[in-house]
Amino acid sequence: MRDLDVITIGRAGVDLYGAQIGGRLEDMGSFEKYIGGSPTNIACGTARLG
């Protein structure tokens, strides 16, 4: 079994942002998705640092 350096607990989610910067929600033609939730952001940032 491998030792763990970091454990995060909480909500992992997906944030959706409109691809058309500055536009209104009803005018959006597409959206981009990114990971979200504080524990997920911490886990991904920690993994990027190695």
Image: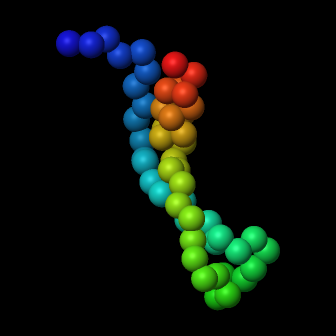
Q: Identify whether 50 is placed above or below 9.
A: above
Can you say whether 45 is above or below 21 in the image? above
Q: Quadrant of residue 22?
A: bottom right
Q: Is residue 7 above or below residue 20?
A: above
Q: At 57% from the left edge and 71% from the top edge, which residue is drawn?
A: 31
The colouring scheme, among rainbow, by chain, secondary structure or one colour, is: rainbow
Give the residue displayed 48% in from the left and 32% down from the top. Answer: 43
Residue 33 x/y as whole percent: 53, 61
Asked whether 31 or 14 is in front, the reply is 31
Residue most toward the right? 22
Residue 49: percent from the left, percent from the top?
57, 22
- Counting from the top left corner in percent of width and height, residue 35 is at 50, 50
Q: How many labels does the image show?
A: 0
In the figure, is residue 16 to the left or right of 23?
Answer: left
Q: Is residue 40 rendered to the left or right of residue 32?
A: left
When the figure is inspected, residue 35 is found, relative to residue 44, above or below; the finding is below
Quarter of the figure with the N terminus? top left
- Tell me which residue sits at (43%, 48%) in the image: 12
Quarter-of-image position of residue 10: top left
Residue lying farthest to the bottom in this orientation: 26
- Residue 44: image x %, image y %? 51, 35
